Image (cartoon, rainbow, N blue to C red):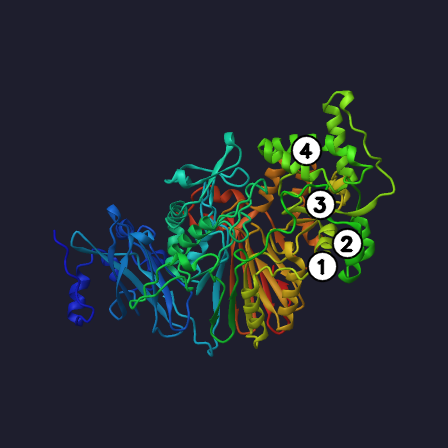
Amino acid sequence: MPLMEPPPLDATQHGRRRFLKTLVVSAAAVPFVGGWPRAMAMGGMDDAARTRALAHFPQSVASGDPRPDRVLLWTRATAAEGRDVPLRLEVADDAGFTRLRVQRELRAEAAADHCVRVRVTGLEPGRAYHYRFLRQVEGVWQASPVGRTRTAPAKGDAASARFAVLSCQDYGGRWYNSLLPLLDEAPDFLIHLGDFIYETIGDPRFQSEQGARTIRFDDIAGALPVGKKDAHFLAARSLDNYRQLHRTVRGDEVLQKLLESAPLVAIWDDHEFADDCWGDASTYLNGITGEADPGRRRNAEQAYFEYLPVDVEVGEVDAEGQSRVDVARLYPQTRLWRELHWGRDLQLLLTDHRSHRPDHAIPEDAFPGALAFDAEAIARLLPASGFDPAIAASQLLSYLDLDDAKWQPLRKPLRRALTRGYADAGLDKRAAAIRAEAASRGKVAVYVIRNILTRYNAAVPGFMHAELPPAEGDYLRGLPWLALGKQALFGEVGSRYFVVKDAFDLLQALRAAEAAPAPTYGPAQAAWLRDALARPAPRWRVLASSVAMVPMVLDLSRPEIGAPVLMQRRFYLNLDQWDGFGRERDGWIAAMDASGGALVLSGDIHSGFATQLGAKTVEFTTPAVSSTPLHDMMLNTAQRDPANAEAGIRLTEQLEALLPVGDPRIRYVQTRRHGHLLIEVAGDALQARFFELPSGACQQRLYDAPAQVRAMGRTRRFAVDARERRLKALD
């Protein structure tokens, strides 16, 4: 059957009625009826019509970044043989599309994986709109599912707001049951704080694969093998890899219905590109080799902007409003950070924690015995640092200089031992020898030298034994990486995770006294945020951060933990978060307090927190939608370490009690559950409600049992008054 010619955009109302009659999805052309079930009202279609629509628009529709006069609309329309697909967009005041506001002719281009981003302008503030996309299939017009979006209220208008906060929705082996209750909540908009996708498949630390929720890359050759050859998993690297992840996640029916119901406001975290990333560098290899990969970063960003309705300048916008992603405008040119408003009283400051941040403060490949600062540098910098000299002294360890003639005989056995150690860690012979040569020179902690040579002596014949330096002596004292908890040649423990608090605080104080540190946000974003905070504050200023600002400190000296003697001290749990840039974080909290206070929304840590960060600044950290909760991740790690399993399990089971002891600003914490956060703002009153599910609840599909999901869940409610800015628990 030949394709029918679409009616012209200036068709008469009679012509429009005739056009609408050609639609096979008649349910989409029926206005909402108050008595309909909400699921029907939201989708605007019965099950059969929805199935037909998704056959031609398999990722459904979405909208994003609402402003008073515009919104970004999105869909994907597939075609065989890589053909472009002509589309029509309709935006209407009503669900029956009898009062059309916008008609646009668009193309779902194969070059963009058939994704369409269209900026619709000229809309009225504070209004709900219905939209759909149309395409011809064998001469018959087929409609997408109907989406409902809304514009932000005018900047001068008083307006309440109701919005959901989401983060961390791993797909493999997991279901988005924690989103089900939101289908009945009708939020004005959705904030997603990152980890919308996960770039890895089958990472044994926190991912599983199960039946229908299994992903297999089509472009295996373009993927990145991670881990040991006999037990590796794959991470996305190619553009096709990242697109496939987005396609798959956006195929989830509950996520689709949620995105059809309200506009999305999204920022990214690390897994949209790579776990614990900074700039264009990943951290899978922990410093064994460099992992900077700007091409991979741009692939990740291109797929992100193709698939998510994020309205930032990443390409030209044509006369129809269609926005295309221009690779030349991506990393390092990308500007994800932006400011939105919801009426007079609510300001959203959306930040990018990943793209411009410096590397983690402690190198993953730092040799544990090497010095971050020697005695001379500490004597010079400590007075200007403001750090407590007594605490500083307690963190220092004895060291000797292997370049001194007295100690040079130690270098050869050290070099031999370290060459073997680096080879065992995965380096080839030449690279291992180079690393070993560097590590066996200069100033090295006595404890590390003795430890390595003791094991060396146990492995070689007696005539090859090295004489150990005395454990005590007239040594200088410095700050080696060992003092911060770094024990392995390559590794994240003692670098990104489980870092000795006092030693790390000293490291950061000395570095700050030596030179001004690079801003975590990068210079341009930091200047933007300072400017935003300097302007007159609205009643509610919201800072969206992909990672948590709340300090997470664990005191392992408590006797009930039963930690080994060397571990009986305070540790930072995770320095990939703001704890890794604590001095700067504290500066931002002070700036927010000085500007009248703020509400910080964060994610990433797979836990829920409510924290009084500052005198006028409160933080809510949303739990993971589906990703493995922090408690379970730590338990898995502890169980894989037989030497420390018992203490690790005790620590994990007491985690929720230990964290508020580590920082009393924490008013609430849970580390075992999935969930979401719903916030309501009306005048001076703000209420936040956590909805939380047991960790096992996401491992089965409960999409047809919303009442069961609600019964399995629990809620925790908090309030903040704009006049006092103090966090109050309501239950």
**Comes first in the chain, label 2 or label 1:** 2
- Tell me the mark number nearer the camera, choosing from 1 and 3: 1
Q: Which mark is residue 514?
A: 1
Q: Secondary structure at mark 4?
A: helix
Residue type pointed to by label 4: Leu
Please name which of the two marks, 3 or 2, marks the residue nearer to the observer.
Answer: 2
Ranked by sequence position, the earlier of labels 3 and 2 is 2
Asked if one can make out residue 224 in the rendered structure from this viewpoint, the answer is: yes
Per the rendering, the mark at residue 377 is 2
Dot 2 lies on which element?
A: helix
Answer whether labels 2 and 1 touch (C-beta < 8 Å).
yes
How packed is label 2: few (under 14 Cα within 10 Å), some, or many (20 or more)?
Answer: some
In the image, what residue type sits under mark 3?
A: Trp
Distance from the alpha carbon under mark 3 to that under mark 2: 15 Å
Q: Which mark is residue 558?
A: none
Q: Are marks 3 and 4 in contact (CB under 8 Å)?
A: no
Residue 189 coordinates in the image, percent (x, y): 44, 63
Q: How many marks?
A: 4
Residues 235 and 41: in front is 235
Viewer-side residue, 468 vs 406: 406
**Outermost residue to the bottom:** 156
Q: Amino acid at mark 1?
A: Glu
